[in-house]
Image (spheres, rainbow, N blue to C red):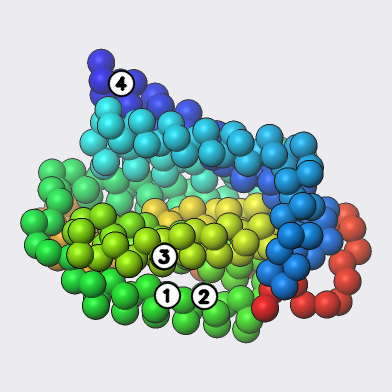
Amino acid sequence: MRLFFGVLLAVVSACALNWGFFVQHGVAASLPPLSVRRPLRSLRALFTSGRWLLGYAVGIGGWGLYIVALSLAPLSIVQAASGGGIGVLGFLVFRARRERPSRREGVGVAAAMAGLALLGVSLIHQSSSPHPVPALGAALWIGLSLIAVGALMFGVRSGAAFGAGAGLLYASGDIATKAAFASAHHLEFIVALLACHGLGFVALQRGFQLGDALQTAGLSTMLTNSVPIAAGIAIFHDGMPVGVLGIVRGAAFGLVLFAAVVLARAPVEEAIHPVEQPATAAIG
């Protein structure tokens, strides 16, 4: 019975999170460019919108249900159920357009759902690492991720780039969380996790203004779910499973990477920019 309710909560969580992303995207896309140079004005624009607050609150509620689901069911099963959330996001986007998705978008969503589900399957029977947390390795991983985020946000400056950047930042926050709380000697990572999650929030909201929901929230979700698993293998000594599960995990990473490339190149609807945007820079 615990397993049943865990899976049920994971499914409800995925629906709530992605509905929240969809609503936030619709509101943020209609606002003037958000800027870290004017944080109070940007936050005021978001938090004074009742519809954006509703999407944000539902998303926070979905995250809370995800935490409860983890207490009732194994991580592998919860993650596999949560992986279907991008399908919910795709349905909402395509329904709002009132037209059939392009072949590229359909393939991207299907590959993302399959990849995230296989990642969950590959975690079956995997236990937590008994090794001490390598602070240097975690710091190096986070540092390289921040360099990649900077290159995306200040180089490419597209909705897909900000969505990918948000995913890398949220993933870095998760890695910092593990490094901070796995050992009392690494509580300095609390600063990193707060900074990464805060910057991830900013990047995702700005991405909503530059790209469609699949390019932003879709990419962010995929990277947030998959990158910490890769970091676990590379720096936390989680190891790669052998046999069939090893093949499954390799295929899962391949599908996630393929989906990221496909969705990043998906066509952007002009309708997501109902308000003419000033030419000034928004982040930096």
Q: Residue at x 45, y 35 (%)?
A: 64
Q: Which residue is mark 4?
A: 4
Amino acid type shown at disc 3:
Val
Q: Which residue is mark 2?
A: 149
How many angstroms separate mark 4 from mark 1 (CA)? 36 Å
Amino acid type shown at disc 4:
Phe
**For residue 175, what is the image quadrant?**
bottom left
Amino acid type shown at disc 1:
Ser
How many angstroms separate mark 1 from mark 3 (CA)? 16 Å
Residue 145, which numbered label? 1
Q: Looking at this view, name the residue that lies furthest to the right.
A: 276
Q: Upstream in the sequence, badge 1 or badge 3? A: 1
Q: Residues within 10 Å of mark 4 (few under 14, many from 20)?
A: few
Residue 191, which numbered label? 3
> Residue 26: percent from the left, percent from the top?
75, 47
Can residue 209 be seen in this snapshot? Answer: no
Mark 2: secondary structure = helix
Mark 3: secondary structure = helix
For this view, does 149 lie left or right of residue 272?
A: left
Closer mark to the observer between disc 3 and disc 2: 3
User: Is label 3 in contact with label 2 (beta carbons under 8 Å)?
Assistant: no
Where's the N terminus, which quadrant?
A: top left
Q: Upstream in the sequence, badge 4 or badge 3? A: 4
Mark 1: secondary structure = helix
How many angstroms separate mark 4 from mark 3 (CA)? 37 Å
Closer mark to the observer between disc 4 and disc 3: 3
Q: Residue at x 39, y 78 (%)?
A: 143
